[in-house]
Image (spheres, helix red, strand yellow):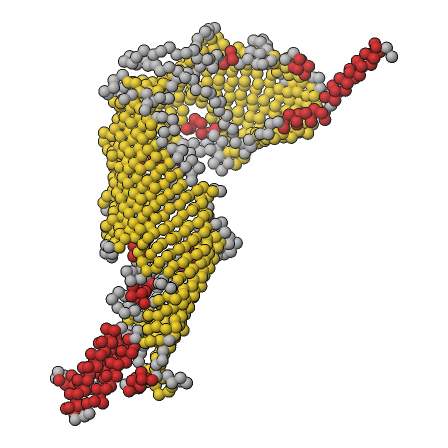
């Protein structure tokens, strides 16, 4: 085979391969695959295509569904006639046909993306337009951004367009209820080519309501025209849209016309934009850009009312308003220097249709006048005035003289440094106008008054109050309407300064008063250097009158105080890392029932790093007379999984429980709490510790109940997790050998009707009761002296935290194997013994008179005295009692049993709960039956108060009443004492003798 033949074969194969590739590229499946592949590179666009067919002069696409940012386009078929060869190789696009019918553009879920072009800052030298300032240096050349609309509107290739038919539907949301409505749209036209005027005609129809609707529908007619002088450039662009609304409110219809025009004329380009109704121009903007010029300028006029645009708002409510104004503007082609001047007179009402929180603003009028220049980083204010009015002017703001400020450095230049720059006069500004700024709550009040001025200082500006800022009748509510504060009057005096070196502000005083007196006094300072990453540094001091603030609605349910002061000193710095120090002092705390509460001092120091992890240290000191409690709470708080992790430790050297009376003062008064009176909110869907996890430790060296009773080495540990809260350990020493141990947990089951569950266990070994009862009743011998062992189980279920505590129940078993039980206190025994002596004397005199044997009667009186001594100190061998805490807060005492050689006591009783009263002070009612034998039994038998029957152990029942009332702290056996005195007197006849001696 010759070489030439081989070359011919290879050429034939190459040509054949090209034809195969070209043929493959012209097949519909390949074209469909290629388009889908290209669309896949744009993940923000979801594109589904059934079939694509590209020919040399024909394009056909079937069944397109495209979605972008919530907007969905469904297109059954798109047809176009275009020479692809010329478009691909000669950059010449000639579309002679573009047809799409039956398409739907669904905008119900459309979320318009905000596209902002980021432009780098342009640096300029400082300059001044003021006659008193130094001459400005020349600005560097500014790159032109604008060169004329038509001049810049140059297509990247030759274009001709004709035969456009686009017919379909657009689905929109209408009205405040966001009901979907369909607008039928048709865009037809063409003839866009060099040397011709092309046009696209728009027709649209939208039905927004039925035949009785105020606005039944809107019809739109419009045209877009363009004159092309070359296949890539334009000499004129103009468009117009005429919309006509019709319905019950407009029998003859109402029109709104929008027109825009960009035209090349001799010497430059002219631009117009107008919006007009029948016989009235609402918006009119005229601008001109001359050839060989670097400036674009124009004028604007505004005269529009709500009635002009409301019919075309697709059912969305529009506030009542009117705006009339006019002005001028000018800028260079780089938009580095912008000038604007004008006047605006506007009024508005029914602003609540924009946002409910604007309802209270009512009707307002605003007049503004301005003449401003901004060039580079420097803004010059030639004229600025603003006045807001209701029935009378409520706000006036005016620039007193011309000044300029460098927005990057903060440097200020003025014509007259000795004169004021700005004056702000608040003449009764309604609080409702600023209420929307407090978006988390509902703020209301009467009016705001005050006056301040701003003047030049050290190259910056300083604002000074001329008349104090006053706000009257302030009230604050939660979003749901719950009242927090009411009837407050505020007065403030402040200064603020801003220079190139930074800023600082000082509030010399803020005073808040209510009808009951001064509630708050506050002063503070804050400032920041202009250096990069400089922190904000602040300091301040506050004094709060607690009796006054506790009478505010926010403090409902908290105990009232006759006196009490809270003082705060705070300082800190705020940057990427933050430091905070707060010193707190609570002094002169006296409750309504004249109880003196401890003074409290605290010193919080906290550091917050860039990750928002907080390290804190909080020493607390409570002082009452000679007793001092010292506590330290320290730890860390750190964000974790959209929650907060806590690692904390509470420690202290000495703590007195009496110092915690400040907490008990927050409770209600001493009334009996019944189950029906206790209310709580509904079922929690999430546990109250949601979002919080971590561990809290407690370590107290000494915990004093009173001077006579204390616990040592109090150690505890609480862990919090998503699963629940667990008291892992609580240990305390109750004497040299006694110890208290407790553990428990709270779980949450979201599927349960009562999701909270509490379970806890407590044990107490070798507890010596004497010190506790001495502490409960100082100066008296303990009611019970013995060594006890105790075991308790506590349980509860609840719908929420308060309900969980309300339903808490528990059992406590107390056992002692030796000790002393005092039925009668020693002082009572002495009284009975004195009664016995009187009885003996009476018996002797009576026997002398009656001639009887004195010794026999005197021994009966002596028996009473001897028995009183026995009951003053019963040396028992065993003492047992079961204690049950019920869901109604009351405590039941069951199976009380005391065994001694000659005395046995059995019975039960109840401790009635009183809200706000310490457990040991709550009313006690214990009924006991006494059985005796031996010498004690003989004495009771001698007195005739002993039953004849005896049990197997020789004990007989005593008929004397034995009730212990009062409280655990102060038991009362007065009924038994009275019975003993009566026995002592009655059995001797002394009472009759005394009556006779007294002549009765």
Residue 165 at x, y = what percent?
Answer: 62, 21
Residue 288 at x, y = what percent?
Answer: 44, 12
Q: Residue at x 22, y 76 (%)?
A: 830
Q: Residue at x 46, y 18 (%)?
A: 273
Q: Residue at x 57, y 28 (%)?
A: 184
Residue 500 shows in the view: yes
Foreground residue among 735 and 383:
735
Residue 408 at x, y = what percent?
Answer: 37, 21
Residue 671 shows in the view: no
Q: Quick check: 164 left or right of 773?
A: right
Foreground residue among 85 and 257:
85
Q: Is residue 450 above or below residue 726?
A: above
For the N terminus, the image quarter is top right
Q: Quadrant of residue 672?
A: bottom left
Q: Is residue 557 above or below residue 520?
A: below
Q: Residue at x 54, y 15 (%)?
A: 225
Q: Quick check: 577 left or right of 628?
A: right
For the C terminus, the image quarter is bottom left
Foreground residue among 355 and 490:
490
Counting labels gives 0
Residue 532 at x, y = what percent?
Answer: 38, 26
Residue extending farthest front: 736
Q: Quadrant of residue 86?
A: top right
Q: Quadrant of residue 491?
A: top left
Q: Is residue 584 above or below residue 430?
A: below
Residue extending farthest right: 1
């Amino acid at each position: 085979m010759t070489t030439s033949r081989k070359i011919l074969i290879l050429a034939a194969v190459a040509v054949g391969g090209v034809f195969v590739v070209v043929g493959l590229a012209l097949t519909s499946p390949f074209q469909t695959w290629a388009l889908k592949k290209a669309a896949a590179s744009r993940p923000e666009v979801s594109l589904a295509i059934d079939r694509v067919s590209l020919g040399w002069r024909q394009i056909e696409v079937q069944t397109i569904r495209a979605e972008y940012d919530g907007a969905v386009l469904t297109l059954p078929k798109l047809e176009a006639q275009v020479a692809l060869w010329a478009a691909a190789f000669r950059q010449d696009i000639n579309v002679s046909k573009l047809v799409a019918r039956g398409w739907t553009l669904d905008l119900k879920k459309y979320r318009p993306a905000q596209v902002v072009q980021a432009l780098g800052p342009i640096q300029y030298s400082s300059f001044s337009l003021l006659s008193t300032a130094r001459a400005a240096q020349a600005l560097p050349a500014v790159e032109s951004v604008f060169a004329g609309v038509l001049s810049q509107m140059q297509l990247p290739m030759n274009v001709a367009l004709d035969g456009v038919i686009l017919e379909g539907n657009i689905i929109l949301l209408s009205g405040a209820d966001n009901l979907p409505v369909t607008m039928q749209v048709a865009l037809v036209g063409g003839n866009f080519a060099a040397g011709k005027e092309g046009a696209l005609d728009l027709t649209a129809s939208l039905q927004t309501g039925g035949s009785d609707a105020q606005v039944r529908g809107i019809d739109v007619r419009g045209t877009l025209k363009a004159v092309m002088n070359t296949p890539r450039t334009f000499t004129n662009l103009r468009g117009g849209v005429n919309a006509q609304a019709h319905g019950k409110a407009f029998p003859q219809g109402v029109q709104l016309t929008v027109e825009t025009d960009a035209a090349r004329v001799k010497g430059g380009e002219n631009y117009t934009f107008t919006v007009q109704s029948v016989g009235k121009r609402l918006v009119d903007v005229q601008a001109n850009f001359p050839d060989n010029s670097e400036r674009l300028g124009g004028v604007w006029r505004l005269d529009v009312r709500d009635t002009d645009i409301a019919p075309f708002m697709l059912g969305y409510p529009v506030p009542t308003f009117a705006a009339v104004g006019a002005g001028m503007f000018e800028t260079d082609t780089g938009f580095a220097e912008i000038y604007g001047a004008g006047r605006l007179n506007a009024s508005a009402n029914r602003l609540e249709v924009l946002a409910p929180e604007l309802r209270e603003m009512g009707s307002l009028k605003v007049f503004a006048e301005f003449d401003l220049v901004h060039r580079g980083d420097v803004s010059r204010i030639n004229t600025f005035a603003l006045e807001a009015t209701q029935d009378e002017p409520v706000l006036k703001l005016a620039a007193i003289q011309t000044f300029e400020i460098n927005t990057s450095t903060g440097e200020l230049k003025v014509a007259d440094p000795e004169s004021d720059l700005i004056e702000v006069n608040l003449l009764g500004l309604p609080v409702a106008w600023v209420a929307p700024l407090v978006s988390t709550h509902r703020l209301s009040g009467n009016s705001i008054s005050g006056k301040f001025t701003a003047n030049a200082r050290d190259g910056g500006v300083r604002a000074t109050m001329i008349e104090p800022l006053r706000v009257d009748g302030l009230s604050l509510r939660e979003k749901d309407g719950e009242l927090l504060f009411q009837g407050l009057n505020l007065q403030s005096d402040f200064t603020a300064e801003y220079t190139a070196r930074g800023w600082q502000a000082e509030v010399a005083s803020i005073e808040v008063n209510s009808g009951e007196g001064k509630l708050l006094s506050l002063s503070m300072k804050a400032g920041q250097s202009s250096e990069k990453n400089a922190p904000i540094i602040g300091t301040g001091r506050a004094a709060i009158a607690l009796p006054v603030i506790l009478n505010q609605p926010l403090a409902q349910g908290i105990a009232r105080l006759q006196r009490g002061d809270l003082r705060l000193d705070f300082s800190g710095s705020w940057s990427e890392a933050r430091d905070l120090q707060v010193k707190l002092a609570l002094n002169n705390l006296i409750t309504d029932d004249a109880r003196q509460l401890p003074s409290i001092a605290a010193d919080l120091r906290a550091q917050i790093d860039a990750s928002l992890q907080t390290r804190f240290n909080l020493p607390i000191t409570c002082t009452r007379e000679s007793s001092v409690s010292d506590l330290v709470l320290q730890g860390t708080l750190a964000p974790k999984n959209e929650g907060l992790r806590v690692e904390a430790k509470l420690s202290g050297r000495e703590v007195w429980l009496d110092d915690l009376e400040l907490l008990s003062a927050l409770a209600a008064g001493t009334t009996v709490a019944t189950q029906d009176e206790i209310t709580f909110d509904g079922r929690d869907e999430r546990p109250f510790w949601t979002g919080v996890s971590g561990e809290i430790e407690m370590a107290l060296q000494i915990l004093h109940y009173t001077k006579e009773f204390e616990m040592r080495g109090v150690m505890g540990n609480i862990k919090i997790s998503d699963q629940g809260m667990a008291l892992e350990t609580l240990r305390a020493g109750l004497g040299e050998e006694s110890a208290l141990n407790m553990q428990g947990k709270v779980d949450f089951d979201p599927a349960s009707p009562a999701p909270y569950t509490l379970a806890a266990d407590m044990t107490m070994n070798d507890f010596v009761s004497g010190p506790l009862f001495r502490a409960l009743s100082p100066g008296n011998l303990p009611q019970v002296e013995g060594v006890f062992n105790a075991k308790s189980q506590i349980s509860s279920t609840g719908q929420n935290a308060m309900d969980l505590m309300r339903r808490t129940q528990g059992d406590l078993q107390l056992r002692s194997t030796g000790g002393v039980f005092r039925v009668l206190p020693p002082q009572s025994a002495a009284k009975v013994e004195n009664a016995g002596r009187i009885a003996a004397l009476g018996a002797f005199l009576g026997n002398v008179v009656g001639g009887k044997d004195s010794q026999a009667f005197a021994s009966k009186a002596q028996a009473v005295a001897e028995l009183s001594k026995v009951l003053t100190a019963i040396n028992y061998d065993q003492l047992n009692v079961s204690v049950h805490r019920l869901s109604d807060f009351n405590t039941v005492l069951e199976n009380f049993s005391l065994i001694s050689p000659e005395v046995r006591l059995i019975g039960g009783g109840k401790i009635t709960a009183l809200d706000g009263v310490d457990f040991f002070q709550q009313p006690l009612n214990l009924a006991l039956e006494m059985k005796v034998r031996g010498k004690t039994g003989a004495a009771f038998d001698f007195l005739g108060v002993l039953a004849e029957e005896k049990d197997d152990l020789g004990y007989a029942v005593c008929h004397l009443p034995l009730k212990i009332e009062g409280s655990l702290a102060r038991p009362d056996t007065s009924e038994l004492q009275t019975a003993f005195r009566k026995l002592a007197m009655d059995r001797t006849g002394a009472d009759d003798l005394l009556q006779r001696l007294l002549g009765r």
